[in-house]
Image (cartoon, rainbow, N blue to C red):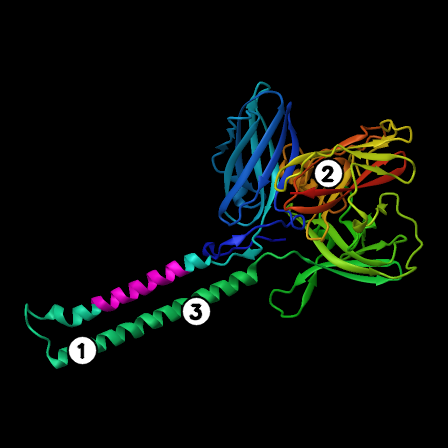
Amino acid sequence: MKRSVWLLLLAVLVIPAYAHVGNKDVFEQVTAGSYKLFITIRPPRVIPGLATIEVRSTGSAIGSLSITPIPMSGEASKHPPAPDLLKPSKVDPAFYTGFLWLMNPGSWKVRVAVDGAAGPETTSVPVPAMPTEIRHMQRPLGTLLGVLGIILVIGLVCIVDASAGEAQLGPGIEPEPDQRSRTVVARAVTLVIVGLLAFGYGHWWNVLAAESTAQIYRASELRLTLRGNTLDLLIGNPAPKEPGAWVALNNADLLPDHGHLMHLYAIRMPEMDAAFHLHPEPVGKQGLRDTLPSMPPGTYKLFADVVFPDGFAETETATLTVPVGMSTAPLSSEDASAAPPALSVGELGSSYKLPDGYRMVWDKPADIEANKGYSFRFTLLDPAEKPATDMQPYLGMAGHAAFVKADGSTFAHTHPEGSAAMPAMMLANPDQNPQASGMESTGGMDSMPGMNMSPEAISPTVEFPYGFPSSGRYRIFVQMKHGSTVETGVFDAEAR
């Protein structure tokens, strides 16, 4: 599915987030050999534009770090440019920063090459880069350009006036009446020509602007049909050459992420006092279906995570109204739910009591800043207040987390590895994942990097790399599994 959008550079476009709602930055914790890297990638605000790369290193000592931008697919992916070196901080030598040009919209990866005490290693992080807004020219700059344009017109008229009049006369000779008439005509013709040129260029610019606006990236549309407690979902887009027509995507256009084509979060708004993590299954060639569990009635904001064949991840959104007594069906074994106190009750702290006597604890930072990467740590305690010993992987990982802003404008479904979708990580690192080139919608979880399918108990502590994109109040839903029980801890955070 082609998602590259070619736009005029002069249109100056903003790139916020596409893989997750309201999140433009990518946060990944990766291991390259014995090197451990916390990588933050901030996509550029314009394309072509500079992406900001930040890397914090632990593990083996690093001698140098270099980065290379590479398209995820296409001929250009076979011919990467020369790498750029990251510069270590003078204050903190384990912190590196640098910049990369992303020349076209689409699905990219940033290849990170490490060299140090443990020898050379490489890893890559996927980066979605798509224009979604047009930034209008700032008024002071527009005023300045307008004044300069007027000065140019006046100067051109004066030049023509002099050329048609006094420039043709000798020193001290006064122009005849017919010469004055020719000068007036020359001025008028010049003004008319300049006016027509300005009008023509203005029309040309407006046409280009309209075309660029029509081509701006927009997430696919999620359409719902609720019959009893059966929810049918279709993902699609308007037909490009048929006004008013809509085309549903085939399930073959999606890649599995942790064994499912879609991860669906349903959160009751505005109080966020009911939340569900569901997994609709494909129905035929198009569409997915889920039998909804017992849900409190109300209006739910839906966030549906999907991944396309080029590794480009999207979060589709929709609104679902659940009527009274809609369903009494039990929750599926791979699904999760939570019924926390409403937002209006007050801010939840760093400890959340779970229904079965377990408790989830957040090692909450004393101060949280927006646009700053963190590794948020959560631990599950048993009823005896000791770290749980019966931990199991949930959907192949130590945990899953959703970060949601109180007004629903921001959503990110993340994993202990980071915010990038696992299929995108596989495509970005084909050498480490040879099966990535043949990924199909029926693939399993055990082939994905970072997946833990072992039945043995795992650590009760999990970390999620993430950074809040803007100031405000957020609610965090964390899923961890012990025994056969999937727990959902809920926490609130205020980012300044």
Residue 376: image x %, image y %? 71, 35
C-beta proximity under 8 Å, tags 1 and 3: no
* Quarter of the figure with residue 242: bottom right
Residue 1: image x %, image y %? 63, 53
- What is the span of residues highlighted in magenta in the rendered image? 143-159
Residue at x 43%, y 69% (from the top left corner) = 203
Magenta region, main secondary structure: helix
Secondary structure beneath dot 2 equals loop
Instruction: Give the mark nearest the N terminus, 1 or 2.
Output: 1
Give the position of the C terminus as an image quadrant. Answer: top right
Instruction: Give the mark nearest the N terminus, 1 or 3.
Output: 1
* Mark 1: amino acid: Arg
What numbered label is drawn on residue 203?
3
Secondary structure beneath dot 3 equals helix
* Mark 2: amino acid: His
Residue at x 17%, y 72% (from the top left corner) = 164
Residue 256 visible to the viewer? no
Would residue 7 appear left or right of 398 to someone viewing this image? left
Which residue is under mark 2? 415
Q: Badge 1, how many Cα within 10 Å: few under 14, some, many 20+?
A: some
Foreground pick, 477 / 480: 477
Residue 213: image x %, image y %? 54, 62
Does residue 398 sit above or below 175 in this rendering?
A: above
Q: Which is in the foreground here, disc 1 or disc 3?
A: 1
Residue found at the far top of this picture: 117
* Mark 3: amino acid: His
C-beta proximity under 8 Å, tags 1 and 2: no
Distance between mark 3 and mark 2 Cα atoms: 49 Å
